[in-house]
Image: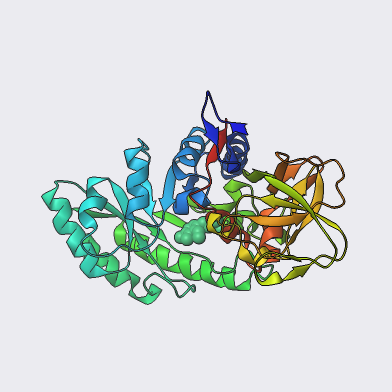
């Protein structure tokens, strides 16, 4: 079994988070941005499954200047763990949550005047200034106010005493694609509107539109702040964008074989009897399943690494276990390490590959890794 430290025994199904790889990725990204452009490390969804607090600490030491989370509770978690850097709430928040936002000095994006007015009242009550980012919709059609309404919106904010506009933010919808026309169009709308807002505001605001894809493909979109998520975790937003900046994966998913058995040709394996053995088969059982975030779609599709070799998943992935075919590995014993994501010997399985088998994409694969999996941090 795996020892964490002292007598503490870990579940033999765990995530290894390589903070040295993370540190190096963050440094490389920051180096390209230079001193003047802020790196906002996106640590929402528990740091894309890697552990928001550990990721934030490492990112901060290696060049990140601020953090992005999806909603209030994710911001509070960082503050309660002692993260003091600016934290931006990337999705618009709802009414009645402004009290905590201000208490914890979290910077919300705003898209709604009623919400802004509530922020003003609460900030006054707490004798604080609420710093906000205007979220603008330049083409994503998800969140954000229309560029044509942005100036009027800013004028209303300017009338308030306890709410201060700190920046303007928008999100690209296509940067991981090879076709950059739509991103250029969004960029042009963003630039034009920001210019007008800044004239009205009489001062510079933080301009923020680039994510990992834009970081790799559109340097003209860096402005004052670049919001990097997936690339910091060592995964390219699309395999097509690989190698423009060399990063290494931070997350590995590892386990152990807990049982090995031999069955005859013609036997069925697992729920639903979806796999029938075509030969006398050595089956290995691995103690983690879809309740841990390992996709059920990998049933009869995926592969794992054992003794540095790829072996296929046979039968359906269960809630807490799944089976692989070990017949071609003569020397294997129970307790043997299994790598589901990451490197073993000369072989590796990347998030993109799991995503391909699962008909998903890499962001989902890492961010849905379950809370039941212990995280082991390599420092
Ligand atoms: C508003 C916003 N900014 C930045 C990011 C980071 O994107 P990426 O992980 O592609 O760098 C996200 C992620 O979805 C986001 O929603």
Residue at x 59% of width, y 58% of height: 365
Residue 142 pos. (x, y %)? 44, 72
Q: Quadrant of the C terminus?
A: top right
> Of residues 80 and 259, which is closer to you in this image?
259
11 versus 91 height, above or below: above
Near-viewer residue (132 or 323) = 323
Q: Is residue 307 visible?
A: yes
**Residue at x 18% of width, y 53% of height:** 162
* Residue 175 location (% of width, % of height): 60, 64
| Residue at the front extreme, as displayed | 264
> Could one spot residue 64 in this view of the protein?
no
- For residue 351, above or below residue 17: below
Which quadrant: the N terminus?
A: top right
Q: Is residue 71 left or right of residue 263?
A: left
Pick out the residue farthest to the left.
Answer: 125
Q: How many marks?
A: 0
Residue at coordinates 51% horizontally, 35% vertically from top-left?
58
Q: Looking at the picture, tell me which residue is in the foreground, 305 or 147.
A: 305
Q: Determine whether, in the image, residue 326 is placed left or right of residue 187.
A: right
Residue 83: which quarter of the image?
top left
Note whether 298 is above or below 13 in the view shown.
Answer: below
Colour setting: rainbow
Please tell me which residue lies in front, 203 or 365.
365
Where is residue 201 shown, x and y percent of the image?
Answer: 30, 59
Q: Locate residue 58 relative to residue 147 in the image: left or right.
A: right
**Spot occupied by residue 155 in the image (x, y as percentages of width and height):** 25, 66
Residue found at the far top of this picture: 6
Examine the image and state in which quarter residue 122 appears: bottom left
């Amino acid at each position: 079994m795996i020892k964490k430290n002292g007598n503490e025994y870990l579940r033999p199904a765990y995530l290894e988070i390589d903070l040295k790889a993370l540190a190096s990725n963050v440094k490389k990204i920051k180096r390209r941005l230079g001193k003047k452009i802020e790196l906002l490390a996106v640590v929402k969804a528990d740091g894309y499954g890697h552990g928001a607090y550990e990721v934030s600490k490492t990112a901060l030491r290696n060049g990140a200047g601020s953090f992005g989370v999806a909603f209030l509770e994710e911001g509070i978690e960082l503050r309660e763990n002692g993260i003091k850097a600016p934290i931006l709430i990337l999705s618009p928040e709802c009414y009645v949550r402004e009290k905590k936002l201000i208490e914890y000095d979290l910077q919300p994006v705003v898209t709604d005047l009623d919400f802004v007015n509530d922020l003003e009242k609460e900030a006054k009550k707490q004798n604080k200034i609420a710093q906000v980012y205007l979220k603008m919709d330049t083409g994503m059609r998800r969140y954000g106010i229309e560029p044509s309404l942005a100036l009027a919106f800013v004028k209303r904010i300017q009338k308030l005493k306890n709410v201060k506009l700190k920046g303007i933010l928008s999100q690209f919808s296509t940067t991981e694609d090879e076709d950059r026309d739509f991103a250029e169009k969004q960029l042009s709308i963003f630039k034009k509107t920001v210019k007008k807002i800044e004239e009205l505001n009489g001062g510079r605001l933080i301009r923020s539109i680039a994510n990992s894809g834009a970081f790799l493909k559109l340097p003209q979109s860096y402005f004052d702040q670049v919001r990097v998520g997936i690339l910091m975790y060592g995964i390219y937003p699309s395999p097509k964008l690989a190698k423009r900046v060399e990063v290494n994966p931070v997350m590995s998913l590892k386990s152990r074989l807990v049982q090995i058995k031999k069955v005859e040709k013609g036997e069925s394996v697992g729920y639903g009897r979806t796999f029938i053995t075509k030969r006398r088969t050595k089956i290995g059982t691995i103690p983690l399943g879809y309740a841990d975030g390992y996709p059920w779609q990998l049933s009869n599709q995926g592969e794992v690494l054992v003794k540095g070799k790829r072996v296929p998943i046979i039968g359906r992935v269960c809630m807490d276990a799944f089976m692989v075919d070990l017949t071609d590995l003569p020397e294997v014993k129970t307790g043997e390490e299994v790598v589901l994501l990451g490197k073993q010997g000369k072989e590796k399985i990347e998030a993109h590959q799991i995503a391909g088998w699962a008909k998903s994409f890499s962001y989902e694969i890492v961010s849905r890794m379950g809370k039941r999996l212990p995280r082991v941090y390599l420092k």
